[in-house]
Image: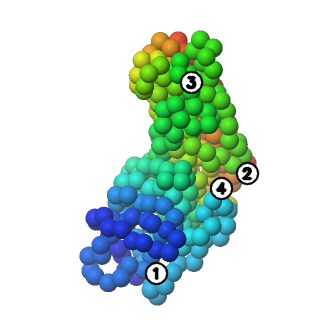
């Protein structure tokens, strides 16, 4: 079995996808793994190629990733830095240190399927959703907070960011906060992990950003969807609204989290809305959890 160390940045074009991997192979030879639709930008770690030079078997959990109709398994991948987005399939995915989960050009977040997922670090989509004053739950020009699972804070009755999305299958980006001028916080991004087993020891986060201008609303929390036969761990899953800024900046509404198969897990899940000085706090988002 050959180990491929991720060292620099080079682009590989596969049929139907445009993944950017830091590759070249130090010992020479051809790369035998293929990515799904999306990108890994400056993500540092390692990949293990198949022993026979062919493709990995696609995990059964990939059938639930309905946004990604055509993928190839990338095998065992350990990410310790950088940014990921789009659709990916793995045998074993390990997240160590801090990895950012952004959205691609189509507005899709980081959606991945695997046989096993282990998160010991931070998989973060904080502020990786819609920009300020953008998205289906965008805050208004008075500085109201963005809405998603919960409505945004509404300073002075100008209209909060509204709620939207599916609480049972959350996949939407969080919306940006409004602002009297500029500086509304960005919404949280979207993360979906489908696997046979998911172990969360660290953090999975999709928080909205705080407002940063005079009377600027916070962005709403994004979406986190976890589905597996077994989910273990006492880590944290967060999709909170961002803080409002200034006297009339409303807090962002909380996002949406759904967890399937986590009856034995002791996860801390938080979808609270963002606070504010006097512009109204964002409303709490939604949590849907089943055995």
Is 168 rendered above or below residue 57? above
Please tell me which of labels 3 and 4 falls first in the chain: 3
The answer for how far apart the CA atoms under marks 3 and 2 are is: 39 Å
Which mark is drawn over residue 291? 2
6 left or right of 217?
left
Tag 2 secondary structure:
loop
Tell me the mark number nearer the camera, choosing from 2 and 1: 1
The Cα–Cα distance between marks 1 and 4, rounded to whole angstroms, is 26 Å
In the rendered structure, which disc, 2 or 1, sits on the residue that comes first in sequence? 1
Q: Label 3 to label 4, Cα distance in Å?
A: 35 Å
- Tell me residue 230's x, y (percent): 65, 58
Quadrant position of residue 284 = top right
Q: Are there few (<14), some (14-19), or many (20+) residues within 10 Å of tag 3?
A: many
> Would residue 98 appear left or right of 161 to someone viewing this image?
left
Q: Nearer the viewer, residue 155 or 48?
A: 155
Distance from Cα at disc 2 to Cα at disc 1: 34 Å
Residue that label 3 marks: 140
Of helix, strand and loop, which one carries label 4?
strand
The reply to whether dot 2 and dot 4 touch (C-beta < 8 Å) is no
């Amino acid at each position: 079995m050959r180990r491929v160390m991720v060292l620099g940045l080079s682009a590989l074009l596969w049929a139907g996808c445009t993944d950017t991997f830091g590759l070249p192979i130090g010992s020479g030879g051809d790369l035998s793994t293929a990515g799904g639709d999306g990108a890994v930008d400056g993500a540092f770690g390692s990949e293990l190629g198949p022993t026979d030079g062919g493709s990995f078997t696609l995990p059964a959990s990939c059938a639930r990733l309905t946004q990604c109709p055509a993928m190839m398994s990338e095998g065992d991948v350990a990410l310790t830095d950088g940014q990921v987005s789009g659709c990916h399939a793995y045998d074993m995915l390990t997240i160590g240190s801090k990895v950012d989960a952004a959205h691609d050009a189509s507005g899709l977040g980081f959606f991945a399927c695997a046989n096993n997922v282990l998160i010991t670090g931070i998989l973060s989509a904080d502020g990786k959703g819609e920009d300020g004053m953008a998205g289906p739950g965008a805050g208004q020009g008075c500085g109201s907070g963005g809405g998603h699972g919960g409505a945004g804070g509404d300073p002075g009755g100008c209209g909060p960011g509204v709620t939207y999305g599916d609480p049972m299958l959350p996949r939407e980006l969080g919306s940006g906060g409004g602002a009297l001028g500029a500086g509304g916080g960005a919404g949280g991004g979207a993360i979906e992990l489908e696997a046979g087993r998911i172990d969360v020891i660290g953090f999975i986060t999709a928080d909205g950003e705080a407002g940063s201008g005079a009377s600027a609303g916070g962005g709403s929390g994004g979406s986190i969807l976890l589905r597996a036969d077994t989910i273990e761990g006492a880590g944290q899953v967060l999709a909170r609204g961002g803080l409002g800024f200034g006297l009339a900046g409303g807090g962002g509404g909380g996002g949406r989290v759904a967890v399937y198969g986590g009856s034995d897990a002791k996860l801390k899940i938080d979808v609270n809305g963002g606070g504010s000085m006097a512009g109204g706090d964002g409303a709490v988002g939604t949590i849907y959890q089943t055995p």
